[in-house]
Amino acid sequence: MGNEVAVVVIGAGQAGLSTAFHLRRLGYEPGRDFVVLDHAERPGGAWQFRWPTLTYGKVHGMHALPGLELAGADPGRRSSEVIGEYFAAYERTFGLAVRRPVHVRAVREDGGGRLRVETSAGAWSARAVISATGTWDRPFWPRWPGQETFLGRQLHTATYPGPDSAAFTGKRVVVIGGGTSAVQHLLEISEVAAETAWVTRREPSFRDGPFAEDQGRAAVALVDRRVRQGLPPGSVVSVTGLPLTDEMARARERGVLVRQPMFERIAPDGVEWSDGRRMEADTLLWATGFRPAVGHLAPLRLREPGGGIRMDGTRVAADPRIHLVGYGPSASTVGANRAGRTAAREVDRLLRGEASRPPTKATEDRPTAAPEYERGNDLSPEGVAAADSAPR
């Protein structure tokens, strides 16, 4: 087979680029020993698809990739532009030779202990696969009674066009979801809409001050326990809480940031609550999060009865040839960096024929890049809870 490599890395977002950096650092040559496949037409990972009003200054805890600092970025520029340019410079600096646009369709057995990665650009045969596909391609749309009868527009965060849209200007809008993105959407839309309502399944928990390290540890531990049991990562906003900014406090005083419970059903012209209340609506915006994009791994039958993929660190418990980075507890930018390092080292051990074993704490704590890129606490609600499972 022409496209034979030791490792295929799927995805060139934060997790995929971190993984490629560490593979290269271990002596694997891009294009010869490993290949990075990305479905997007240009660098930037999921960031390039974020809504235009998400400026770099509004980004929660963007952590630099290992080996190259992101410095001097204008906080007023679009995050999609800032991070897209940074990722492009990173790929050039380390010669990662990302192949794009390449759509990975399936990963299956290839005989002789190898894996076959089937794509829009042909197939690759590899001894190991590191999947860093994130969640952006799997927006979660809850099914709700009457949803199909609604005559207005229904949008999701994945396709949110910004507040200056015909879907919001002068319209009656219901924003559904209890995460940071939902609140950001609501605050923007309330400036142009005729009327807004904020609906969540659970009462939101706001927090004052910076995100504490113990909260971060608790959030990551919660997700880690779930994926080790083979359960979907789920949402951890109930652990982290929402940061109460000055802008949010002002919106709450204006009556914008007032949460209502989840409606009972959707009518053709609005939404209805169980107590008989109703609101006419032109647009429903589902800010209900995302789920891991792992459909390409379906032929390997890795899912557990609980619905998730059981993990041991970054390694799939059922198949040590498969690693997931940016999945579950590593679904944050600093978490993705560390997961990329771990996955590269584990795969290196596998390829060298060493017994597969979890890294020791001493090994895991030893930095392989400039230490300032390994410190920090990017465990914001948006970073950790990338895969919300229901409207909150």
Image (cartoon, helix red, strand yellow):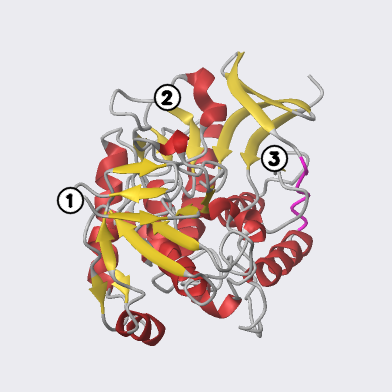
Start and end of the magenta stretch? 95-101
Contact (CB < 8 A) between labels 3 and 2? no
Bin the neighbour count of mark 2 within 10 Å (Cα to Cα): few under 14, some 14-19, many 20 and up.
some
The residue that mark 1 highlights is: 275
Between discs 3 and 2, the one toward the N terminus:
3
Identified by mark 3, the residue type is Phe
The residue that mark 2 highlights is: 302
- Dividing the image into 4 quarters, which one contains the N terminus? top right
Q: Is residue 198 above or below residue 227?
A: below
What main secondary structure does the magenta stretch of the protein show?
Answer: loop
| Residue 96 on the magenta span | yes
Q: Quadrant of residue 87?
A: bottom right
Decide if residue 114 is on the left or right side of residue 36. left
Residue 34: which disc?
3
Bin the neighbour count of mark 1 within 10 Å (Cα to Cα): few under 14, some 14-19, many 20 and up.
few
In the rendering, at what x and y percent does residue 61 appear? 47, 72
Residue ID at (62%, 24%)? 106
Residue 366 showing in the rendered view: no
Identified by mark 2, the residue type is Leu
Secondary structure of the residue carrying tag 1 is: loop
Residue extending farthest to the left is 275
